[in-house]
Image (spheres, grey):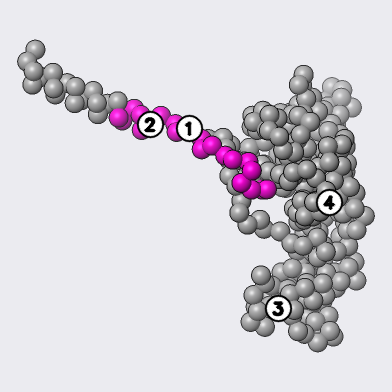
Amino acid sequence: MTDSTLDALNAKLDRLIEAVTRLAPSSPPETDISTADCFVWQAEPGYLEPIAKVNRVDIGLIRGVDRVRDILHDNTERFALGFAANNVLLWGARGMGKSSLVKAVHAQINASGKTDGPLKLIEIHREDIDTLPKLMTLLKAASYRFILFCDDLSFDHDDTSYKSLKAALEGGVEGRPANVIFYATSNRRHLLPRDMIDNERSTAINPSEAVEEKVSLSDRFGLWLGFHKCSQDDYLDMVNGYASHFGLDVDPEALRAEALEWATTRGSRSGRVAWQFTQDLAGRLGKPLD
């Protein structure tokens, strides 16, 4: 074999090695947990993405849920201080501040200065629930305490990933790490469609056992905090709170009339509707909501 043939073969091998290297999955970037207080879990390739500016509102602007706010705050504070605390399911009416409350309480705990180090909030997407054990393994060796947060958690008829969540929360040999707690929001108290539960009840050989299997996921949450539709007075209180906080100069009677009309056109009253009205009002007044 001539030298020129060997050189050509070596060049082809180099190109082949380079192509294979490009196809290989890249290693996930290293995350310094001390760089931020909030992260998003990126299941593929498996790292924590720091969030510099968190989308949240001041806890004082979340109205009409005083009792559940205090319960969530106390549970979170106990956990942050190293004491026993429960996983929490915030369920109920849409737009009543479930996810906003989780983020606001987290910020309030860290601002209080009572803990030795900052409490970390990590959001995990609903579709990545089956990677929860991998994330917990990553966190258990860290020196911080973590809230794992899943917004709008629910499961469909053919979805079996809820079994992985059950084991990760309170099941399995190892159990949940002491420095990790799980908060979830959902419109459903049992996280599964009602017709799915009813179907199990009507078709299973042992209906009670089938239903127990489906609803036992919610039992992994020690605290169930219910959010219900707000009254007109609560809705107007939310609107007034936003208007005052952002300095929107509007005649009180005009503000009330416009807010009620807005709710009527939407067909509902909630914290989300109050916020959307405030955004519209601020836009019409030429003011940003910073």
Gap in angstroms between the C-alphas marked 2 and 4: 46 Å
Q: Which residue is mark 4?
A: 92
Residue furthest to the right: 67
Number of other residues with Cα within 10 Å of mark 3, as a class: few under 14, some 14 to 19, many 20 or more:
some
The part of the chain drawn in magenta is 18-38
Q: Position of residue 249 (x, y in %)?
A: 76, 84
Q: Which residue is mark 2?
A: 23
Marks 2/4 in contact by CB < 8 Å: the verdict is no
Q: Is residue 274 magenta?
A: no
Q: Residue flagged by tag 2: what amino acid is it? A: Leu
Gap in angstroms between the C-alphas marked 1 and 3: 47 Å
In the rendered structure, the answer to whether residue 108 lies left or right of residue 12 reads right
Q: Secondary structure at mark 4?
A: strand
Q: Residue flagged by tag 4: what amino acid is it? A: Gly
Gap in angstroms between the C-alphas marked 2 and 1: 12 Å
Disc nearer the start of the sequence (3/4): 4
Q: Position of residue 163 (x, y in %)?
A: 74, 28
Checking the image for residue 281, the label placed there is 3
Q: Is residue 26 magenta?
A: yes
Number of other residues with Cα within 10 Å of mark 1, as a class: few under 14, some 14 to 19, many 20 or more:
few
Q: Which residue is mark 1?
A: 27
Front residue of 155/40: it is 40
Q: Secondary structure at mark 1?
A: loop
Residue furthest to the top: 1
